[in-house]
Image (tube, rainbow, N blue to C red):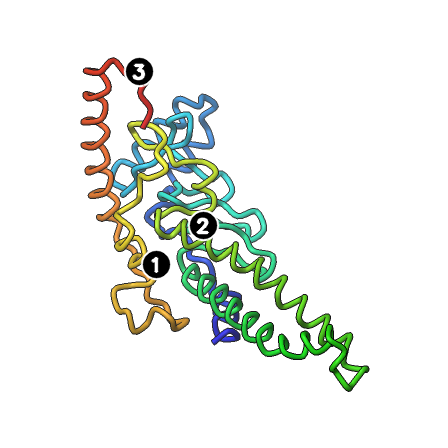
Amino acid sequence: MFVWSYWMTIFTSPASPSKEFCLSNSEKERYEKEFSQERQQEILRRAARDLPIYTTSASKTVRYCERCQLIKPDRAHHCSACDMCVLKMDHHCPWVNNCVGFSNYKFFLLFLLYSLLYCLFVATTVLQYFIKFWTNELSDTRAKFHILFLFFVSTMFFISVLSLLSYHCWLVGKNRTTIESFRAPTFSYGPDGNGFSLGCSKNWRQVFGDEKKYWLLPIFSSHPRPSIYQKSLERRKKYLKFKYHICKCCGLFPFFP
């Protein structure tokens, strides 16, 4: 399972935006001819009018990738290493030489999980020989260095992977990516780190799917449902509006989401 998950994480191609997010030839031509940023943004706003996009840049402009020449979908970012825009990009991982995003995020989490279990298995298996090493009960002196090295390496990797897996489990529960944890996405009402959250249970199901029998298998079962983003945002807006009125009545300003 460890090798399978690692294989899937490496060789699953990052998901890229669909053609509907690309500008038409006429729109590209008009965009490139314009020198005014305001007019360029007007072209992008018209092109993005019918697209399922709810986030903007920090300056409230349409997120556009000059390299790929497309309007970035929500949670998509351009990876300079892969030279492409990646859907729900989390990070570019040098350990797998691939972008971790929507298409392989589940595989990446399972890779961390099975790496953790593998390190734990090695450490517990070698532990009895490690104890004999310290008590001078180990008869084979040539194996002392190997046992010492194997125990410390497996323990070190166990601690490292445990911290990384715990962090990503927290991200899944909040429905955030690594990028979003450092820079909250900007919506029409402002930056909001919880803008995509649907509740802990639904957040986990968004990554692993509804079929629990596939959760521990490196089989793609994640499901994108852009409509649920809109439902989440509508609930979030109602909550923030209610919170704003409460703060206003109590005189608690400035108000932050």
Q: Secondary structure at mark 2?
A: loop
Q: Residue furthest top?
A: 251
Q: Secondary structure at mark 3?
A: loop
Quarter where residue 185 is shown: top left
Marks 1 and 2: in contact by CB < 8 Å? no
Label 3 crowd bin: few (<14), some (14–19), many (20+), radius 10 Å: few
Residue 167 falls left or right of residue 185: right
Q: Which residue is identified by label 1? A: 207
- Residue drawn at x 70%, y 78% as measured from the top left: 132
Q: Which residue is identified by label 3? A: 253
Task: Decide: is 119 above or below 53.
Answer: below
- Find residue 190 and report its horizontal and vertical position in percent: 33, 28
Label 2 crowd bin: few (<14), some (14–19), many (20+), radius 10 Å: many
Which dot, 1 or 3, sits closer to the camera?
A: 3
Quarter where residue 75 is shown: top left
Which badge, 3 or 2, comes first in the chain's sequence? 2
Marks 3 and 1: in contact by CB < 8 Å? no
Which badge, 1 or 3, comes first in the chain's sequence? 1
